[in-house]
Image (cartoon, rainbow, N blue to C red):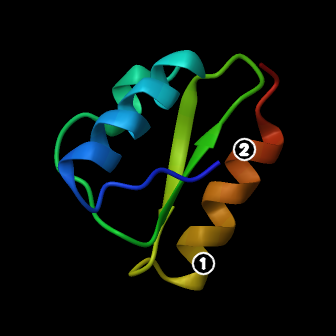
Amino acid sequence: MSFDVTDEKAWFKSKQEAYVLGVPKLLNGKLTVGWVALFDRNGNQIGKIVQDMSVEDMENALQALAASKA
């Protein structure tokens, strides 16, 4: 799933989609382009990957997701 936040109309639609998916807090606050939110099976955000992270930090985030028991 991707969210378009390029203008107000797209932002509003994306907020609605996030609400339907059960992650309304995902689009709160300051946003940047080039990031991926990581969720456990229960829809809890447990991490994220952003474009300026090191490869090691990205691997650690993905390992944390894989180790998630929820």
Q: At numbered mark 1, what does the secondary structure look like: helix, strand or loop?
A: helix
Q: Position of residue 30 (x, y in %)?
A: 17, 50
Q: Determine crowd level at label 1: few under 14, some 14-19, many 20+ residues with C-alpha closer than 10 A.
A: few
Examine the rendered structure and indicate whether residue 36 appears above or below residue 14.
below
Of the residues shown, which amino acid type is indicated by label 1? Glu
Examine the rendered structure and indicate whether residue 29 appears above or below residue 30.
above
> Residue 46 appears in which quarter of the rendering?
top right
Q: Position of residue 4 (x, y in %)?
A: 41, 55
Of the residues shown, which amino acid type is indicated by label 2? Leu
Marks 1 and 2: in contact by CB < 8 Å?
no
Q: Name the residue located 47 percent from the left edge and 50 percent from the top edge.
A: 3
Q: Name the residue located 48 percent from the left edge and 29 percent from the top edge.
A: 18
Quarter in which the C terminus is drawn: top right
Q: Which numbered disc flags the more N-terminal residue, 2 or 1?
A: 1
Name the one closer to the observer, 46 or 30: 30
Examine the rendered structure and indicate whether residue 12 appears above or below residue 44.
below
Query: For the residues carrying marks 2 and 1, which lies nearer the camera in this image?
Result: 2
> Residue 45 appears in which quarter of the rendering?
top right
Q: Position of residue 22 (x, y in %)?
A: 55, 16
Q: Name the residue located 71 percent from the left edge and 57 percent from the top edge.
A: 62
The answer to whether residue 53 is left or right of residue 21 is left
Q: Name the residue located 65 percent from the left edge and 48 percent from the top edge.
A: 1
Q: What residue is disc 2 on?
A: 65
Name the one closer to the observer, 40 or 16: 16
The answer to whether residue 40 is left or right of residue 36 is right
Q: State the separation of the CA atoms marked 2 and 1.
A: 14 Å
Q: What residue is disc 1 on?
A: 56
Examine the rendered structure and indicate whether residue 11 appears above or below residue 24.
below
Name the one closer to the observer, 60 or 46: 46
**Number of the label disc, if any, that sits on residue 20:** none
The answer to whether residue 40 is left or right of residue 25 is right
